Every structure is written in structure tokens, then in C-alpha cells.
Image (spheres, rainbow, N blue to C red):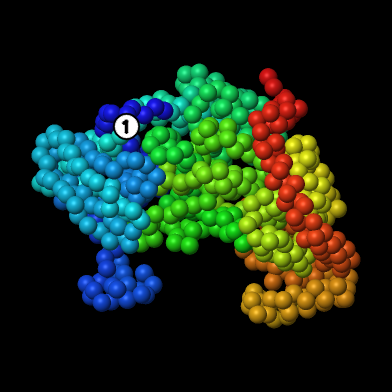
Amino acid sequence: MTVTEDTSAWRVLQRVVLPSPDQTDTVSLYADAGSANGIRLRENDELARTPKQPEEKLQMFSSGGREAHFADLLGRHSMRVRSGEQVSFGTYFNAFPASYWRRWTSVRDIRLVVKTSGSGNISVYKSNARGSVQRVDGKHVEGSAVSEFELSLKPFGDGGWYWFDLAGSSGELVLDHAEWEGLSQVSGPGQVTLQITTMNKPEFCLNNARILSENLDVLKDVKEILIVDQGTNQVEDQDGFAGIDSALGGKLRVINQANLGGSGGFARGMYESVENGSDYVLLLDDDIVIEPESILRLLTFADHCRKPSIIGGHMFDLYNRSVLHTFGEVVNPHRIVPAQPHADMDVRHDFSIANLRQTAWLHRRVDVDYNGWWMCLIPTKVIREIGLSLPLFIKWDDAEYGLRAREAGYSTVSLPGAAVWHVSWTDKDDLVGWQAYFHARNRMITTLIHSPYKKGGRVLRESVQDDVKHLVSMQYFTEHGRIEALKDVLKGPDVLHASLGSKLPEINALKASYSDAQLRENVDDFPTPKIGRGPIGGAPIGMPSKKELVPWGIRTVAKQLVTTPGAESLERPQGFLAHRDNRWFRLAHYDSVVVSNAEGTGASWYRRDPKKLKAMLTEATGLHMRIFREWERLAEQYREALPELTSLEAWKRTFDANPGAGK
């Protein structure tokens, strides 16, 4: 990327794009029927000034609840508007996120260029941070026409979007293509390495490679597509790989290495992007479906940023594709908890129910602490300065990197209009099972490095509370992993690289000792529960209030320590619990229960054991007390080791020591 000093030119910032033929369930993200009417403040100015909640001050105007006709989509950039109908492009993928360009780039003047054929009207709208809608321009068109609308980004300091609507008049109106252009001094795009980390999910990888091969125009500035394959069911062995490889014109490269987790795979992508001279690396998860236009949008935005910045895409639900799982995430500094939605946003917004124009919080710019590595573009300049991922295997690597970048002066932007579809966290439960080890260890390490509070704020206290919750829930395998995590934190940073390839097998080897870790495919594989042996009354059990939480915990732990489960509960479960009911305050009332997993693929038998509870609670409490006493020493140790742990040289040694099977 280079910048000319004395010339500016109009350059494409964002193209209007439409869903591919196999994405009928995503039309509402690209175009919808109806007017631009969205949120309107009530006319009473006094009421509008009253400091009430936004939902109390605003009225909602429906767009009619209709999706655009799928049959009218003529291609990735072209669409028909029927006579007498109106289609709005004030949607997630096609509205222009003006406030983000205003905040992070030097672009101040843009223009909308719309090429149409037929008869109808073009109307241009904008919103502000409150979501109020204003018509700013428009024109009537006949025949083949190219319409240009020059617009300013200056009023978008806190939020707001631009978009346009099309209306067919006496005959149909066809959108041939449309682009948002910016008056820019950026004379050349940067080069990006597009990297996918995978572990035994070759179908997803091949599908995304196929999508890219069918959208070669988005790859013009991609130096190479790199798949880091850490599995045994390898991508190169799949039917169709050779054809897709050929279609990508030599840009695809596969590196096989041992399973070093997500952090090891993404670190390899970072490393290779620096080595091959790329300006950026774009990290992608394997179990996603990509919107390929997002690649251009992330790269173009990053090129125009005033300072090098990490630019991430959003995540939609893979199984409910009109649902936006998260619009921006922050890390609570007192708790060091990731995946926390920004205070101004709602989680799991469904665009098929309420479009962009009807949803107030989507119009306020959301500033984030980090972006998940399901889709995240990182400048290699940042990598050279602050290093690669911490060797954490999985969990917390993306959040920690965002915090580390911010401390070095580099911001993260979650850019609207760039996204992937990914399995949402509601369909996973990675706080139970083998992943609990990595959650507990990596949260503690991240806190030691980055917490601004004495003794890490609330993290140690909440960690003890989590131990109690898992133990009264009879999740002994999970708790064993958490105990091992605390032990490894105390060993210091020197073991992190060495344990990357060995820790997961060690954790999994513990499963054989715990019935709660034994997954069976069918609930009929377990003995049938005897009626009336579960919690008295069988009514749903609610969570204790904050006031009652500590007394409840003391009573529950004491009861589980001094009472022996009946012999019958060891032979037959007291009931079955669906995953959504698998909550600690319910499980604590059972001696024996079968619980299904989040994926719906099986169930496990939880059985209460007072001896395990006593031994594990004693050990976990002692380890927390030791970490509390040694907090300052450990924090200094991890902070001092950070540059070496994340260096290219340290990761190269790890890569060399953990080769894959190869070909």
C-alpha cells in the first residue's frame, strides 16, 4: 500500500452485492422490500428530550415484513425491481457504514454510483447514531442510466449509515450494478495472505475454497491462500481438491503440521505472511461459510485506515443465517471475560424480523477491544512489532492479541458489511469437558499479563465460584482439567510452547476415570430412571438471587459433602436433562442424572461423589490461594516472557519440532 501526496481519485470502497443462488435464506441481509422508513423520534420535542430509554422514546415503522423476491436476483450485483414495488438496500451487506469510515480513515467525501436500466426512482438516505432516517437525495431514471450522488462523511462522528432504495414505476427497473466510491489518496492496494486453520474439517475448507474459486475477482490482491492442516483427515486427500486447486490458479498452498490448536495454526499463518512479504494476513476459521465480498471490504478498509489497524468481520449463525450473533465484543477489565457484547448492542439479532432501518442500536458505532479469529485481518507491521499469537492452543488467543495490540497503540475495528457464517456459541458448550482446561488456564494467563487491577480484579474469586459450580454439578472431569490448568499457570510461561502438542492428549487421557466424560450416542444406553427419585416436586429450579448465592453455595456444598448418595442412584439415574437445562443450580439437586451435550450427539451420566468433591475443592482452593499469594511474581514473569513467547523465532522452533504427516 502506498499513498500519493498530491493527487486524489475516486476509488471503489464497497460494491453492492447480492446472495449466491444457494443462499435463499440470507436475502434479508442484502435487500428487502418496502420503504426506507425505520426509526422515527416522536414529534413531541419535549418527549424526545426526556432522558428515557431509547425504546420508550422511539416508534417502530415496519417495512412490511416482506423479503425481496428471490426470483428477481439476476446475479451477484444485479437485481430486478418490479413495477410498482420498492426495494431497499439499507441492509447489513449493502448499506454503507459511514461512521466507521469517518472514525478510522481519512476519507471524508464519497459518492454513490448506480447503473440502472428501465423506469423508476432512486432515493438516497442516511441515518444518525440514534437511528433517525433522513432522505438526502434522489432522482427519476429512464432507460439506461448512470446516476451519481456525492455525499459527505463529516456528520457521522458517533454513528449512522448511507443507503439507497429503488422503486419501479410504469415498468420494471433493473439494477445493473452500484458502488460506493471514496475520494482517496491510497494509490495501491495491499497484498494479503488468506489463511485457514483446520483440524479434520476438510469439507468446510473445500467448500470455502470452492466459493473463492467461483469469485476470483475478490482474490486479485490475495498473494496466496494458505490452509494450515493439523488433522489426520486431510484436505489434500479429498475428492475435488485437485480441481479447486487448479481453479485457484496456483494461489492455494497447504501446510501440514501437528495439531498445535487454533493458536498454532493462526500463528503459522501470521508467520508465513511475514515471510512471504504480505502487507496483511486474513485469519479464517475452518468451520465457516464465507461471504467472499468481505475479503475486498476488509482489505480496502485496512488500506485506508489512518493508522495500521486490525480489521475484523462479524459472525452470523451458520444454522440460522439471518441472525447476527455478535456486532462487537469487549473485554471487561475487572473480570477479564471475553465474548462480552458491547453495552450498546443486542446479541443474536435476526434481520429477517427487524431490518437495519428498524433497529436503533445498529446505527450507533460500536468500538471493540478485539475481533474473533473466525475472520480477522491483521497488518504484518503489527505482527512484526508485537509478535504472533500466544501459544495457548485454543481459547483467549484472539482476545489477548487484541488487548496486546491496543496497549501497543493499534486499534481493532469490527467492520459492518464483512462477515462469515459460523456455528454460534449457543450451539456449543466449551466450558464443560476438555476445553475447560484451556479456558481456565488461558483466562488466568491473560489476566496476569493485562489486568490493570490488583490481584487481577474479580478473576480469582470468579474462578473459585466456577469450581464450586462444576463440582456441585458433578462435572468432575471438567474440574480435574481446571485444577491442571491452575497447576500449569504456576509452572510459569516456559512450558507453553513445549506443551502445545502434548497437553490435549494428556487431558483426554483423564476421561477414562470419569463417567461424566463418557459420551453415549443414545439415552437408551443408560438405565431407565425410576419415577419420583429426582428433585422433590419435579418443578423447574431457578437460579439463586445474588443475595442468596453465597448462603446457597455454602449449604449446597455442605449437603453434598455430608450426605451419601443412595445406592440406587449409582445404578440408575434419577432423570434425564436436556442440554438447555444443564445448569449448575439444577444439577446440584441430583445425585445421579443423564445430561445431553450441546451438539445433540450424545449424553453423559453424572453421578455425585462426596470424596471427589472434597478432594477437588480442597486442591482447587489451595491452588487459588497460592496464585493469590504469588500474583505479583507471576504477573511479572509472564509479562517479561511475552516478547519471546510470541516471537517469530520461538514459533519457528515450535513449527520445526511439530511437523505434519506431509505428502
Indicate left or right for 329 with 53 as reference.
Answer: right
Three-letter code, disc 1: Gln
- Based on the displayed image, in which of its 4 quarters is residue 238 positioned? top right
574 or 327, which is in the foreground? Answer: 327
- Based on the displayed image, in which of its 4 quarters is residue 555 positioned? bottom right
Residue 352's x, y, as percent?
Answer: 38, 55
Residue 399's x, y, as percent?
Answer: 59, 48
Residue 573's x, y, as percent?
Answer: 78, 66
Indicate left or right for 27 with 204 as reference.
Answer: left
Q: Name the secondary structure under disc 1.
A: loop
Q: Residue at x 29, y 69 (%)?
A: 59
Quarter in which the N terminus is drawn: top left
Residue 335 sits above or below residue 314 on the image: below
Q: Residue at x 76, y 67 (%)?
A: 468
Q: Residue at x 31, y 52 (%)?
A: 156
Q: How many numbered dots are placed on residues in this image?
A: 1
506 or 309, which is in the foreground? Answer: 309
Write down the residue under mark 1. Answer: 185
Residue 598 sits above or below residue 621 on the image: above
- Based on the displayed image, in which of its 4 quarters is residue 530 positioned? bottom right
